[in-house]
Amino acid sequence: MKKTAYLETARGAKPQGKETPAAAPAEFKIIGQPTPRVDGKLVVTGRAVYTHDVYFKDMLFAKILRSPHASAEVTAVDLTAAQGLSGVMAAVKLKEGRVKYEGEQVAAVAAVSERIAEDALKLIKVEYRTLPFVVTPEKAMAEGAPRVHDSANLEKINEYSRGSVDQGFAEAEVTFERTYRTAIEIHQPVETHASVAKWDGDELTVWDSTQAIFNVRDGLAEALGIPETKVRVIKMYMGGGFGSKLDVNEHTIVAAGLARQTGRPVKITLTRKENSLCVGNRPSTQITIKGGAKKDGTLTALSLKNITCGGTDRGDEASEPLIDIYKCPNVKVEEFTVFTNTGAGRATRAPGHVQGTFALEGFMEELATELGLDPLEFRRKNYTTSNQGGTGIVYSSKGLDKCYDIGAQRIDWTRRNKKPGEGQGKRRRGLGMASQIWWGGGVPGTLADIKLHRDGSVEAISGTQDLGCGTRTFMAIITAETLGLEPKDITIKIGDTVYPWAPISGGSLTAPSVGPAIRDAALKAADYLREMAAKKLSVPAADIVLAGGKLFAKSKPDTSIAFKDLVKGMRREAVFHGERGPMPAGFAYNTFGAHFAEVEVDTETGRISVIKVVAVHEVGRILNRLTAESQVVGGITQGISTALFEERVIDENTGKMVNPNLQNYKIATSMDMPEIVPIFVDLVDPRINNLGNKGLGEPPRIPPSAAVANAVYNAVGVHLREIPMTPDKVLRALQSKEAGS
Amino acid sequence: MEKTSRKKKKTVTRRAFLQGLGGGAAGAALATRIRGQAAGSGQAEAPLPAAYTRKTINFTVNGKQVSAEVEPRETLLEVLRDQLKLAGTKRTCDRGECGGCTVLVDGQAMYSCLFPAVRANGRQVVTVEGLAEGEALHPVQQAFIEKDAYQCGYCMPGFIMASVALLNQNPNPSLGQIKAGLSGNLCRCGNYVKIYEAVAAASQKMRKS
């Protein structure tokens, strides 16, 4: 999906509800406890079916021929030889005219095996007229650079202002300007993008490795010119997405077309190289921040200029953390995107916020040092309980202050070097921290059903997706909690567009959207059961409690009926529709956190080792402590990977990516892991929804690279303003520091 | 893959074969013939060298004797997934970079995407589907659930097999040994820290029993 659409969804609908939803109880029995995944057995025995594993007997395998050039005119495509290869059932041309990046699709084949399809690609003859290209933002902005699109390569994508920065800088006693850079990252989900398309008459079913079944359904219907009612999209298990699987993909449309043409199911699985080239990346940024403050640490002005690059598509807006997180009356933002002849960017876990936080929080660290203040105290000094960008709307709940207190205590913040780089020796340690803000309020209008069967079985149903964050398990937990059952008693049905609508699984939306919808449906089911039990037990319905697989009267605890016996009496199965209600207007709904990192820098090799990360988050009520901790652990791991290793490298001379694999595109391994301490501020948002929970997907992904960079600064006294902080950059920075001193 | 067409006899001239090594269109045409799909109106050619003909291999998978007809270039991963329909073993990078396809071959952890299927002849292969005994999970599998060692779960079969191999060789590994033992496997969701906890818990349980 377009990043702008993604951001609109992530920000959430404008709160417009009038009333606070049914208040979330202060205490729950199962919700909030650590509960192992209800589908764990399926996954650890290898029986969970991912899209890669979908198989039909007469299935064909599709492969796509992609442009080897960063910019070229496709003048001729000859499919004859490929079509003549035994085992090839269809070959199609996908492109005529201009291709704008390495990896853009040109032609496709469907064959009886993947190997034959690969061979057939080699028989397709394509004539290209190569054109001048540009692959770096610097060169794309230069005068006379080849144009990527018809319009200019540089385009303004965002501006914002409040107060007067001129006045703010005039009032400042210290002003300071720094530039920060972040590299292009590739999502690299372990399961490469994949789709299986199967027609039955004029009805299409697609199994897709996706974070958004409804987006895929709607996108396919539009692309194929058929009604949405004729398309069904199924996602069972998926091997990672991180934003790269939020929309219908070109290859899925190709598979559907080839399946229609051949009358057989068609499967397409992208290779690791394709996954590296053409299904998204995290755009790079170059962020310049200027800030002004009084000597006591009061911020008077902040300005930000971002030049971002998302290849052929727009880059990421990265200013939201600067606009919102600290109290500052005068702020100005300008953001530009640069187009290049490289694969298009897509939303990548916490888009814009990862880059923007690296810049902002690095800047806050440096400014604190300049002011002679403790960086944590500096942040506390500019703390706010209202959302600054939303012109002062009060946060419905904000536990960032508690995150600071708990984190500082657990890492023992007093151990930090009072003066950055004051330590001695070859290996130097330092502590750093960074704050986090994200949305994560959820999507009003999300639907879910609870179905009670006469044999006592219960289904919780939603057209959502479980990316591995534990959606199935929290659905079971909420249903079981509300009906007085155990999570294992609940059958979970998700990942199918025939189920009630749910939003994309991205942007920290799933738990605060689907959770409250399930709760709403389950509360209705509980009311229905209470009425039934009241008649059976001859007590008022309001006196009935659901617990331990039974319904009993609070006033007469030995008067009870087993859940299974009660539902036997139903005339038919009963369905209860739930909906996630609106959020009361007048409040801002955001998530918060603070990470504290300890690092060791080897000043001889330039290697950075992260020793420990204490991560404290405030995301309202926790639904499942076990899977919530995994979210935090994973976010930190990815954040460290971004901070130290990850970078897409394009050869400027050929316009081709030189590391489209997992050997040269380095991601963190088990050898790179610190001790990780995930902590949650236990706080229930009083009005966000009927559970008091917010999302957790993005938050832990946001602060780690900034916290690590700040810890490196504290260790060696030189701030690396560019990620990844590879050893060469560390050594160069150390040398420049020596030269400067 | 279509088994019927695979059984057809293929031929290729030595000259075509050598040209094929140079790649390009000739290589592609050649590869097709080697693989065993009918290659159109082929002229009479010398038989394929023995080393390049299809072979029947016999080996055990998860304790069961199986046989498969394979090409020299086929990997154990392809045979497991495509022929034997054991989809628990995952294809992730397909070039030995991530460990997602790890299986046990005679008790050793192996990347099945780099392991030529012909080499499996006479060996004992164990995949993630073969660890549990009926409904009773292997202690490593149980620990991975209890410690929530995974998120999307796609890399888990590889991690579980690597962990089983590690604990078979070293029943009581230190944290450093666990990290090193699993360093050939990538988890993009980033759950390594939870995976160590699971392996340590499994180790303790296995030593007690």
Image: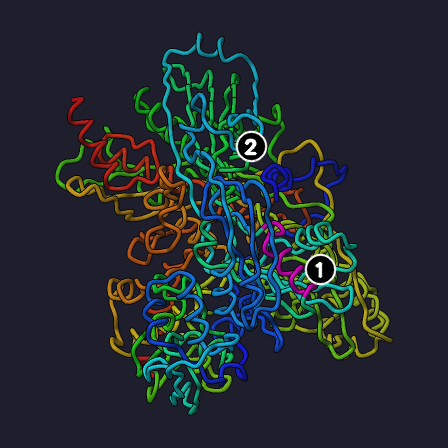
Residue A60, located in which quarter of the rendered image?
A: bottom right
Q: Residue at x 30, y 39 (%)?
A: A725
Residue A507, located in which quarter of the rendered image?
A: top right
Q: Is residue B126 above or below residue A76?
A: below
Quadrant, the C terminus of chain A: top left
- Name the residue at the left extreme: A425
- Name the residue at the front extreme: B43
Q: Residues within 10 Å of mark 2 (few under 14, many from 20)?
A: few
Q: Is residue B47 above or below residue A354?
A: below
Q: Which residue position holds label 2?
A: A149
Parent chain of label 1: A
Callout 1–callout 2 Cβ contact below 8 Å: no
Amino acid type, label 1: Thr
Query: Per the image, is B180 magenta?
Result: no
Amino acid type, label 2: His
Parent chain of label 2: A
Residue stretch in magenta: A246-261
Distance between the Cα atoms at labels 1 and 2? 36 Å
Tag 1 and tag 2 share a subunit? yes
Name the element at disc 1.
Answer: loop
Q: Residue at x 38, y 41 (%)?
A: A654
- The disc placed on residue A497 is 1
Query: Per the image, is A248 magenta?
Result: yes
Q: Position of residue A16 (x, y in %)?
A: 74, 36
